[in-house]
Image (cartoon, rainbow, N blue to C red):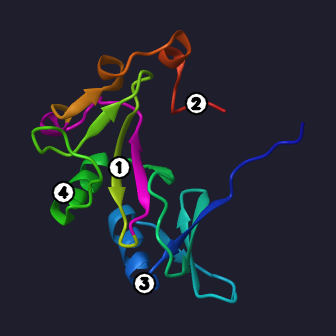
Amino acid sequence: MDSITFTHASISAHDLAESVRFYTDVFGMERIPSPDLPVPVEWLQCGDKQLHLFERQVEAPEYHHFAVHVDDFERVYRIALERDLFDEYSADGVPAIYELPGGALQTYIRDPSDNLVEVDRPDTEGLDPEIAAAVEKRSETVSQSEEGLRSSLYTDS
């Protein structure tokens, strides 16, 4: 089979300038040249992939999301906390951070157009203890199959 890989994710933005500010401020993405299309678009560099924003007045799907790995999870967490961006909170009102069976961390935030963004980190090693204390192990709250226990968000391939 031929090699395939993702090149970009494309999401709607109610206010293109506001969404560009969000992704550049929160994640450090950078604007790159965008083609002229029938609707206003902005392309952003996200690591070796791209995020394409297109201006449309449509509702974001409730559970559909894309995920980004961040080197500085604490920085993004604190910005999200300050701006009240988290999608889920624990029973005691702390933003939900989940540890998957493979050790990866994930939390979910909403952008200005209500798109769901998963924020990932490979593990808890070196994580601020205050933030680490909020981590909920999925394997302790959701029964895992053998395959589930072998799953890994971060792979070598």
The residue that disc 2 covers is 155
The residue that disc 4 covers is 81
Callout in the foreground (2, 3): 3
Which amino acid type is marked by label 1? Answer: Tyr
- Sequence-first tag of 1 and 3: 3
- Which span of residues is magenta-colored? 114-131
- The answer to whether 97 is drawn above or below residue 71 in the figure is above
2 and 3 marks in contact (CB < 8 Å): no
Instruction: Say what secondary structure mark 3 lies in.
Output: loop
Which amino acid type is marked by label 3? Answer: Asp
Instruction: Say what secondary structure mark 2 lies in.
Output: loop
The residue that disc 1 covers is 108
Callout in the foreground (4, 1): 1
- Sequence-first tag of 2 and 3: 3
Q: Residues within 10 Å of mark 3 (few under 14, many from 20)?
A: some
- Sequence-first tag of 2 and 4: 4
| Magenta stretch holds residue 127 | yes
Q: Looking at the picture, how far across and down is residue 144, in whole percent? A: 44, 16
Residue placed at 68% from the left, 52% from the top? Answer: 6
Which amino acid type is marked by label 2? Answer: Thr
Instruction: Say what secondary structure mark 1 lies in.
Output: strand
Of all residues, the one furthest to the top in this rendering is 146
Residue placed at 35% from the left, 49% from the top? Answer: 108
- Sequence-first tag of 1 and 2: 1
Q: Is residue 7 left or right of residue 47?
A: right
